[in-house]
Amino acid sequence: MRLIGMLDSPYVRRVAVSMKLMGLPFHHEPVSVFRHFDGFAAINPVVKAPSLVTDDGVVLMDSTLILEFVERLAPETQRLTPPDIAALARNQRLTGLALAACEKTVQIVYEHELRPSEKRHAPWLERVEGQLRAAYALLEAETGEGWLVDERVRQADVSAAVAFSFTRFILPEETLARIGFDALERLSALTARAEALPEFRSTPME
C-alpha cells in the first residue's frame, strides 16, 4: 500500500503511526498538497492528504476512513480499537477530542498563514482558540498515568499524542499561552510516552 502525504500533517502521521503499530506494511510517499499539487492530483484528483492507495489500486482518503479500512487488514490482537463496547465508546470519544484539537489547530494556522492580516476575523480566531482549549481541557481531565483506554496503546493514544505534538510544534508561543497549553501536564506526559515508542520515533514530523 502507498500512503501519500507529508508527516507534518497530523492526519497523515496518525495513519502512518497506526499502520506501524498494527504491523501493516506500506510505502510512504511525502507528497505535499501545496508544493506538489499536480503530482498529488495525478494520484488523487481531490488532492487530499492523507490518501492511501490500496494493493488493488483503490484510492482512499480521510484519515478516519483509511484507518477503518486498514483495521480490517490487521490481526485482531494488533488492532487499535478495543473489542469491548464500553472501551470502544471511550476510545471513540477521546479520539474525537484529539481530532477536534487537530482541526482547530489547522484552522488557526491557515488563518494566520493563508489569509491576509487585514482580512483576519478576530472573533472567529477567539472562537477557534476557545474550541481548541476546550478539546485539550477535556482530554487532560481524562488522562491518567497509563494509556487512555486500557493496558495497551489504542487509537485514542495515537491521535491524542499526534495532536498534542502537532499543536506544540506549529502554534506560536503566545497562542499556546492563551489556550493554557503548559497546564496540560498529564497529556504532555502521555505524549512523551507515546513519542518514545519506536513507531513514533520512526515517523517524525517533517
Image (tube, rainbow, N blue to C red):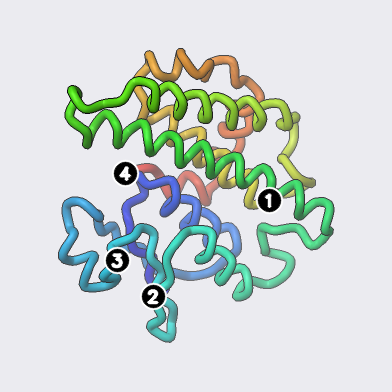
70 displayed left or right of 149 = left
188 displayed left or right of 16 = right
Amino acid on which disc 4 is placed:
Glu
Q: Secondary structure at mark 1?
A: helix
As measured in the structure, the alpha-carbon distance from the residue carrying label 2 to the one carrying label 4 is: 23 Å
**What residue is disc 2 on?**
59
- Between circles 4 and 3, the one closer to the viewer is 3
Q: Nearer the viewer, residue 194 or 35?
A: 35
Q: Quadrant of the C terminus?
A: top left
Question: Residue 198 location, x and y as percent?
Answer: 53, 48
Q: Which mark is residue 206?
A: 4
As measured in the structure, the alpha-carbon distance from the residue carrying label 3 to the one carrying label 2 is: 11 Å
Which comes before the other along the chain, label 4 or label 1?
1
- Between circles 3 and 2, the one closer to the viewer is 3
Which comes before the other along the chain, label 4 or label 3?
3
Question: Residue 62 location, x and y as percent?
Answer: 45, 61
As measured in the structure, the alpha-carbon distance from the residue carrying label 4 to the one carrying label 3 is: 23 Å
- Between circles 2 and 4, the one closer to the viewer is 2
Q: Which mark is residue 46?
A: 3
- Quick one: which residue is furthest to the bottom in this view? 56
Which comes before the other along the chain, label 1 or label 2?
2
Q: Secondary structure at mark 4?
A: loop
Label 2 crowding class (10 Å Cα cut-off): few <14, some 14-19, many 20+?
A: some
**What residue is disc 1 on?**
92
User: Toward which corner of the image does residue 22 lie, by quadrant?
Assistant: bottom right
Which comes before the other along the chain, label 2 or label 4?
2
